[in-house]
Amino acid sequence: MPFFRLNDGDLRPDDTIDFNPEDVPRAIAAFGGEMVTNGTEVAMHAHRKDELVLALRGVVRLEAGQSVWIVPPRCAVWIPRDVAHSVNVAGDVEIYCLFVEPDAALRLPRQCCALTISPLLERLLVHATHMPALYDIDGTDGRIATVLLDQLSLAPVEGLRFPMPEDVRLRRIASAMMENPSDRATIDDWGRRIAMAPRTLTRILQRETGMSFGRWRQQLHILIALQRLDQGSSVQAVALDLGYEGASAFVTMFRKALGKPPARYLAERRLAAH
């Protein structure tokens, strides 16, 4: 992502100066836009301020609060202050980051979560990236910041996350599944690959995520599917990419997990957002 320079109250792109939005003495500070990358990773770090990460296009993967988010359509990830997190982006990406003073967002969750972002909230956030860093608190931009925070506090929480275990061996499995989601290896297969009893793997996974191996992998597949379907991939293509024999088996899994087939689920999300 670009660095920024503070100049007469405005944020301007500048590749030579590292700008820290946490230094801005305002309720909000935002930046973002479009970028093309073969893969960029921001290592584990934490902020004094709360942060919202919104992806409108491209592949964005974020790890925080012992979970991984493959940021789904019309959603953003909310990261409270002092929570360590990493961000990985790849491809043609449009991403926006909002930093919020903790005392300005008292009604927002105190744990990491995915929030549904309405079209109004999306436009307010994009607009905020063009506001002066030291915007007039009592002026138009100050009122926009207030409306943005009000809308953010009303954003519904989504149960869309992929729990990331602390166990090193299970994290290896998680990373491998994210890199190659079409791999249909069972828990017994993984036990043989990493020389560990499947029963032990199952017990640790249940303790750390509350999920069986099948449910854990299914959650990852749902997140990947939502992102790819929203980007225009066909159900058949997504099903094959995730290792299913065909669209029918994938749709059956999706319906059992979310209560409706993919096309209807996405259509209702878009309708609700508008």
Image (cartoon, rainbow, N blue to C red):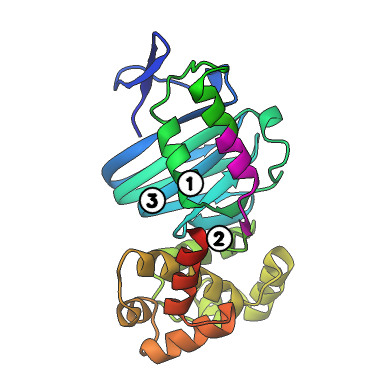
**Magenta residue check for 25:** no
**Residue 45 place in picture, x, y as percent:** 55, 35
The quadrant in which residue 250 appears is: bottom left
**Residue 116 place in picture, x, y as percent:** 55, 55
Which numbered disc, 3 or 1, marks the residue that appears first in the sequence? Answer: 3
| In this view, 247 is above or below 116 | below
Magenta segment boundaries in residue numbering = 147-157
Q: Amino acid at mark 3?
A: Leu
**Magenta residue check for 152:** yes
> How far is mark 1 from mark 2, CA to CA?
37 Å
Neighbour class for label 3 at 10 Å: few (<14), some, many (≥20)? Answer: many
Q: Amino acid at mark 1?
A: Leu
Neighbour class for label 2 at 10 Å: few (<14), some, many (≥20)? Answer: few
Q: Nearer the viewer, mark 3 or mark 2?
A: 3
> How far is mark 3 from mark 1, CA to CA?
14 Å
The dominant secondary structure in magenta is helix
Q: Amino acid at mark 2?
A: Arg
Which numbered disc, 3 or 2, marks the residue that appears first in the sequence? Answer: 3
Q: Report the residue at 70% width, 69% height from top.
A: 204
Residue 42 seen in the figure: no
Residue 120: assigned label: 1
Q: Nearer the viewer, mark 3 or mark 1?
A: 1
For label 2, the residue is 171
Neighbour class for label 1 at 10 Å: few (<14), some, many (≥20)? Answer: few
Q: Quadrant of the N terminus?
A: top left
- Could you say whether the residue bearing mark 3 is in a helix, strand or loop? strand
Q: Report the residue at 74% width, 67% height from top.
A: 207
Residue 56: assigned label: 3
**Residue 168 place in picture, x, y as percent:** 59, 58
